[in-house]
Image (cartoon, coloured by chain):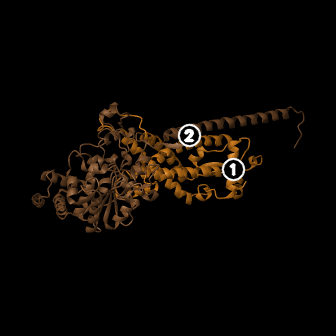
Chain colours: A brown, B orange
């Protein structure tokens, strides 16, 4: 580790160190990044060195584009109350354009983007926050007179990779929710020629974005992705399988209301509609706000905010399964199924009684005919 | 039907051993899957005590997955036997692709709805029965696909990850929807069970043919002339 510490000393003396955080904090950050990426502690010095090189060279260039969003990912990243190491590192690397964070405005801001793009052609990491409207030529989101779609097209040739931060940028998110008035789509539906990495979440976890950046800086390649372009290091497991309340699920201990005994005991929130079993994210192990907490720890079921179209698919949030829309009536799957079984049973019973009645009538008629036949004195032969 | 009673009745093998084994394995596994599946989706209890000492839902889920594998195995056995078994179990005879089968299906439906109208008995499955069982086998297949897609998403080996990704892509990357479809299959089988049990009893009572004991011994009393291929065309 000596080498890494030496590196850190150089780095401290270089004057690039922001006074917001200490060397100790930086080392802890590197350690956490190693854990996040599943690396051994031998990699901590390498991570430190990679970050140092990146900061000294001020590259790769990062351009952060905001479209149909709430700036929630930016907010999450800056974590207003205490400037995080992650934010500082990202800014130090080279955050050349960020509408919310940059000091410049108007034409000068656009100029900064242009400069950054021209200077690092093909090497720009384009972070996109927010969905992209496509309806009516995308007029629902314009910046500096250009639509989001035009900006993406303009930036695409300069990009190394597009990083879709947040569920809106990754999958369309809330703007895409039914009825999707702006025809919103995610970055992956628009970008054709460059790789796209999705970091969904509402908001995305800032440490995951840092992990992605660190992975690129250390190994000079992008991390392994799953079928939905999400990095496996962060989206490789379901919330349900990493959840601290999981033992209560296996035991069969559930909170049935938000204020009952089970809720106070920290029992599993499965029956309150937790979407942890359907959601791939790292919340349970990485947590939020300086690893302080995360929704399930705070007592709220997961709503699956990092999954595709969660607003349409995972609602109602406090029910286990979505509604079944049948005959214009919204029903729970079990109520619908139970009703159908009941109707079938009644139908079967009715059919049995009906058949029995018809057959009985037939038998009666036969017996009657027989009796009448017997009553006749001389039945005809043959 | 008067001439029938005069014809020779023989006691013949209809359902071969693999068919019977598959049938009862499916019965046992589907009932187990239904009960455990209902409990997993809607656990009606909250076990008291320390979570470290109890594993109630874990055990129920284990039984569910075990029964799922049994269902898969019995389905594969049935699938295979549909290609090599006797003529009563062949997929080729089960598919309603000929005109007479549809005529027969209509005749059977009519006699079920209007019990005054009699229809023919059939040695194996009659075409209407075949249609229903084809639907049920599709239901079994659908449950297996959705079930193993859900199962794959709890396993993190490359095999299961690939399988889970395929399964998820099949359903528009909507894992919650897969859960819903899988849940609805429970009610599909519940309805089938009610109808199936009723029709078995109905057939025994009304047509006086053996049904339940046939699925155990595999043998059935059959009119000899029904064995002629012409008998398939009423």
Q: Could you say where residue A217 lies in the image, as x and y percent from the top left?
A: 23, 62
Q: Quadrant of the C terminus of chain A?
A: top right
B174 with respect to A40 (left or right):
right
Q: Which mark is residue A340?
A: 2
A232 with respect to A342 (left or right):
left
B184 with respect to A376 (left or right):
left
Dot 2: chain letter? A
- Given residues A367 and A170, the one toward you in this image is A170
Say few, some or many: other residues with alpha carbon within 10 Å of mark 1 (under 14 / 14 to 19 / 20 or more): some
Any part of residue A337 in sight: no
Image point (55%, 49%), residue name: B136
Q: Could you say where residue A32 lies in the image, as x and y percent from the top left?
A: 21, 52
Image point (44%, 47%), residue name: A312
Relative height, residue B177 to residue A334 (above, below): below
The image quadrant of residue A364 is top right
Q: Could you say where residue A8 lies in the image, as x and y percent from the top left?
A: 12, 58
The image quadrant of residue A354 is top right
- Give the residue furthest to the front: A107
Q: How many marks?
A: 2
- Given residues A23 and B95, the one toward you in this image is A23
The image quadrant of residue A247 is top left
Dot 1: chain letter? B
Name the front one of labels 2 and 1: 2
Q: Quadrant of the N terminus of chain A?
A: bottom left
Q: Secondary structure at mark 2?
A: helix
Any part of residue A216 in sight: yes
- In the picture of the structure, the residue carrying the numbered disc 1 is B106
């Amino acid at each position: 580790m000596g080498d890494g510490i030496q590196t850190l000393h150089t780095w401290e003396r270089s004057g690039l160190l922001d006074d917001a955080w200490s060397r100790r904090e930086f080392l802890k950050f590197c350690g956490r990044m190693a854990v996040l990426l599943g690396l051994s502690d031998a990699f901590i010095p390498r991570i430190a060195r990679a970050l140092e090189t990146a900061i000294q060279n001020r590259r790769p260039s990062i351009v952060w584009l905001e479209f149909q969003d709430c700036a929630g990912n930016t907010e999450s990243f800056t974590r207003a109350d205490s400037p995080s190491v992650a934010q500082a590192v990202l800014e130090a690397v080279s955050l050349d354009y960020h509408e919310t964070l940059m000091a410049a405005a108007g034409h000068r801001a656009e100029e900064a983007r242009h400069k950054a793009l021209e200077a690092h052609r093909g090497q720009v990491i384009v972070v996109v926050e927010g969905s992209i409207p496509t309806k009516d030529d995308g007029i629902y989101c314009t910046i500096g007179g250009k639509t989001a779609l035009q900006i993406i097209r303009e930036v695409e040739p300069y990009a190394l990779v597009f990083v879709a931060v947040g569920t809106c940028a990754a999958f369309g998110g809330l703007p895409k929710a039914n009825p999707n008035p702006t025809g919103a789509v995610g970055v992956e539906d628009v970008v054709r020629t460059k790789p796209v990495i999705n970091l969904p979440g509402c908001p995305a976890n800032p440490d995951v974005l840092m992990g992605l950046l660190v992975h690129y800086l250390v190994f000079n390649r992008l991390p392994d992705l799953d079928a939905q372009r999400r990095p496996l290091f962060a989206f490789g497991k379901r919330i349900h399988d990493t959840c601290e309340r999981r033992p209560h699920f296996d035991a069969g201990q559930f909170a049935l209301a938000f204020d009952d005994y089970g809720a106070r005991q920290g029992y599993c929130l499965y029956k309150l509609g937790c979407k942890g079993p359907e959601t791939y994210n790292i919340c349970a192990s990485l947590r939020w706000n300086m690893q302080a907490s995360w929704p399930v720890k705070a007592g709220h079921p997961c709503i699956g905010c990092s999954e595709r179209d969660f607003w349409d698919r995972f609602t109602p949030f406090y029910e286990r399964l979505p509604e079944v829309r049948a005959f214009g009536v919204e029903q729970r799957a079990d109520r619908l199924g139970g009703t159908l079984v009941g109707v079938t049973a009644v139908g079967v019973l009715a059919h049995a009684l009906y058949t029995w009645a018809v057959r009985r009538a037939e038998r009666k008629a036969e017996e009657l005919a027989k009796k009448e036949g017997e009553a006749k004195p001389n039945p005809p032969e043959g | 039907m008067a001439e029938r009673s005069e014809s020779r009745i023989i006691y013949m093998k209809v359902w071969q051993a693999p068919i019977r084994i598959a049938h009862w394995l499916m019965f046992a596994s589907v009932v187990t899957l239904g009960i455990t599946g209902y409990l997993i989706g809607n656990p009606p209890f909250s076990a008291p005590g320390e979570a470290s000492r109890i594993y109630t839902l874990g055990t129920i889920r284990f039984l569910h997955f075990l029964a799922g594998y049994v269902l898969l195995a019995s389905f594969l056995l049935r699938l295979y036997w549909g290609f090599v078994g006797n003529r009563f179990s062949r997929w080729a005879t089960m598919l309603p692709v000929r005109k007479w089968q549809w005529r027969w299906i209509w005749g059977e439906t009519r006699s079920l709805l209007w019990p005054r109208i009699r229809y023919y008995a059939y040695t194996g499955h009659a075409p209407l029965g075949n249609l229903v069982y084809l639907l049920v086998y599709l239901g079994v297949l659908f449950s297996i696909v959705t079930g193993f897609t859900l199962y794959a998403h709890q396993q993190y080996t490359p095999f299961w990850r690939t399988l889970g990704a395929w399964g998820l892509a099949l359903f528009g990357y909507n894992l919650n929807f897969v859960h819903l479809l899988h849940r609805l299959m429970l009610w599909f089988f519940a309805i089938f069970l009610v109808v199936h049990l009723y029709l078995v009893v109905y057939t025994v009572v009304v047509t006086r043919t053996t049904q339940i004991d046939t699925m155990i011994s595999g043998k059935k009393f059959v009119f000899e002339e029904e064995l002629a291929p012409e008998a398939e065309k009423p």
